[in-house]
Amino acid sequence: MGLKYGCAALITKIEEVNGKYIVYAEKKEIAEKKPRGFVHWISVEDAVNCELRLYDLLFTEKEPNKLENYQDGLNPNSCTIRKNAKMHKDLLSSFIPTFFLLFSTENRG
């Protein structure tokens, strides 16, 4: 795995303690292969709670119009809400007076 904007790391152990996961890793020299995944992290002191909404494809079918009832092709996981996610506290100072504090992060595809 790789740390976003950081070095590559090798996970050596994962523990669950009181419902939280602790990941142990060691720095890895840059290899010829790019890491398969990246981890974004912030310190406990800089983290604040937030609600995170993860969006996926709206339909499970490539061509929902070809279904007899297009609603049969709706993806039940097209929006997943994670309560008590963490974000960096500095994002709070970016608040523009509206009903919601919205941020778009990196998207795939």
Image: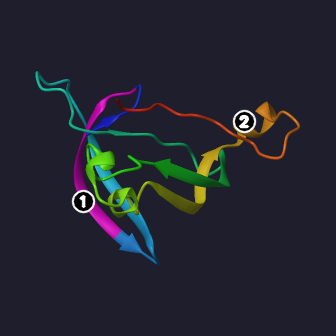
Q: Residues within 10 Å of mark 2 (few under 14, many from 20)?
A: few
Name the residue nearer the viewer: 28 or 39: 39
Which amino acid type is marked by label 2? Asp
Instruction: Please report the residue visible at 26 percent of the width from the left and 48 percent of the height from the top.
Output: 66
Q: Quarter of the image containing the C terminus? A: top left
Q: What x and y, as percent, mark residue 18?
A: 47, 78
Q: Residue at x 44, y 40 (%)?
A: 40
**Residue 33 located left or right of residue 13:** left
Q: Looking at this view, is 60 or 96 the one in front? A: 60
Residue at 38 percent across and 46 percent down: it is: 57
Q: How many marks?
A: 2
Q: Which residues are magenta?
A: 6-15
Q: Position of residue 83 (x, y in %)?
A: 60, 63
User: Which of the two residues, 67 or 39, is positioned nearer the viewer here?
Assistant: 67
Location of the N terminus by quadrant is top left
- Amino acid at dot 1: Lys
Q: Main secondary structure of the magenta part?
A: strand
Identify residue for label 2: 90
Quadrant hosting residue 14 = bottom left
Query: Residue 32: which quarter of the image?
Result: top left
Element assignment for label 2:
helix
Q: Which residue is mark 1?
A: 13
- Vertical arrangement, residue 81 with respect to residue 39, above or below: below
Q: Nearer the viewer, residue 77 or 7?
A: 77
